[in-house]
Amino acid sequence: MASGVLAQKDTNAAAIDAYIQPYVRSANFAGQVLVERNGRVVFEKAYGFADSEHHVANTKATQFHIASVSMQFTAAAVLRLVDSGLISLDQHIGDFVPDIAGADKITIRDLLTERSGLPDINALADYSDVLQHHQTPASLVGKIKGRPLLFEPGSKFLHEEHSAYNVLALIIEKKTGLPFAAAIKRLVFAPMHLNASRIDDDSLPHSTRMAKGYEQEGEFGLKLATSIHWSAKTGNASAYTTAADEARWIDALFKGHYLSSSSRAAVAETSFRVGYGWFRGTNKRFGQIAYSMNGRAPGFASFVLYLPQAHTTVVVLSNIYSSATTAIGYDIAALSLGLPYEPFRFSGSLDPAELKSCSGVFRFGPDFYQPNAEVTLTADEKGLFMHWPSGEVSALIPLAKDHFVDRAYWEQVIIHRDPSGNPDALFYDQFQGRATSGRQ
């Protein structure tokens, strides 16, 4: 029986590795993948380069910036302060940051569940400039002072509240008397023995263990990502770690005694879909409660999934700026549990004439990711590209005729044609855009 179990594990590991390879070959994934079942690591492997220019391979010890997954550590530090009696979840933030809108209404709990209504620093017109300078929690919070609330605190979740976690970072500094990086090390990383995890506050010396970040160029190319000051993402996206440390953290958070039972219950609560650095709720694909989080920041992407009923954890960390990590993580979980999944099969470059026939302008409705967006498809010798109203341009990877995947956001893109063969609709994820009179 023991040999049969071993053979099954080997087969499963081989299937996971085979699933990942097309993402690696097409330059859409480089990094670490870890799968844990029933408390044991059943798959762990590194792929691609930490430093492509010098051919330095990613290893299990390579450290990756994890973008929004960082919020889990900020939330945990706040809960440690709650458990110590230094603050309470229902305390108003006016006790700490009195000079921002709604300070007398917003609670610590509102910040943790991203229901504060604070204006989002990432949406500011000068945010790209913010990323090019060293910041502190105080300077980041200062960016939203004098700006009105977007909605009544506690009433709803609108979008990821980066500013809320900047405010939490400032509160952590005020209550501990320590810079945020040192406070997180004391409250979270050191007690949990997360020795490969840190907060990047721009003071780090160059480390051969730190992966360089890359972004996509065209259909299958890569280039170095624009460098940023990671201190500009303090509290919401400034942590770096390894897959092994992240898996250890998930075990401790949900199954250990790192937090009080009431604080663990707050993290596990599913009445709010978003909270404490997690998306929470019943996942239809797996038919059970799931806790997940993804993140993207210049040069990096990450995804974590915890299925408590299936005793399964999946961690995917990448030093390529692509949302493929989310698709990879969910599919690997399905593969591990014997559920259906769809392998990534790309067809290679299509004939230029065929790509040109896909060009057009398409208008989406108010429920689209960018409401009422008019997107344009253009083709050249490098491939097919989607131009967003925001100015962002996504390369589309061909899967089959009129069937693509958006390389940046990893969403399915399907072109529908009229009887004359001209594109009359564009399907993006579950949304449909209708062709306008504008032709490219």
Image (spheres, rainbow, N blue to C red):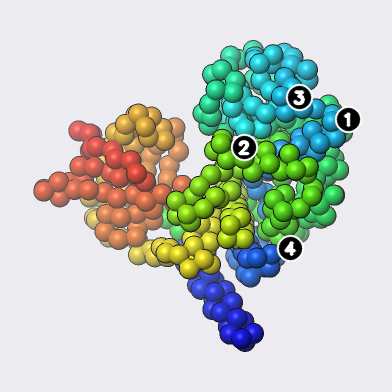
Residue at 69% x, 13% y is 104
Image coordinates for residue 419, horizontal then vertical, percent: 11, 48
The residue where tag 3 is placed is 138
Q: CA distance from mark 3 to mark 2?
A: 23 Å
Disc nearest the viewer among 1 and 4 = 1
Element carrying mark 2? strand
**Which amino acid, by three-letter code, is at mark 1?**
Gly
Q: Which residue is mark 1?
A: 177
What is the distance, in whole Å, between disc 3 and disc 1 at their CAs?
Answer: 13 Å
In the depicted structure, whether residue 74 falls above or below residue 302: above
Specify which label sits upstream in the sequence, 1 or 4.
Answer: 4
Of the residues under marks 4 and 3, which one precedes in the sequence?
Answer: 4
Q: Are marks 4 and 2 in contact (CB under 8 Å)?
A: no
Instruction: Looking at the picture, tell me which residue is in the foreground, 265 or 273.
Output: 265
Using the image as rendered, state which of residue 265 and residue 300 is in the foreground: 265
Q: CA distance from mark 4 to mark 2?
A: 29 Å
Residue 78 has which mark? none
**Closer to the eye: label 3 or 2:** 2
Q: Residues within 10 Å of mark 1 (few under 14, many from 20)?
A: few
**Mark number displayed over residue 275:** 2
Q: Amino acid at mark 4?
A: Ala
Q: Relative to 164, is 30 above or below? A: below
Mark 3 / mark 1, whichever is N-terminal: 3
Tag of residue 61: 4
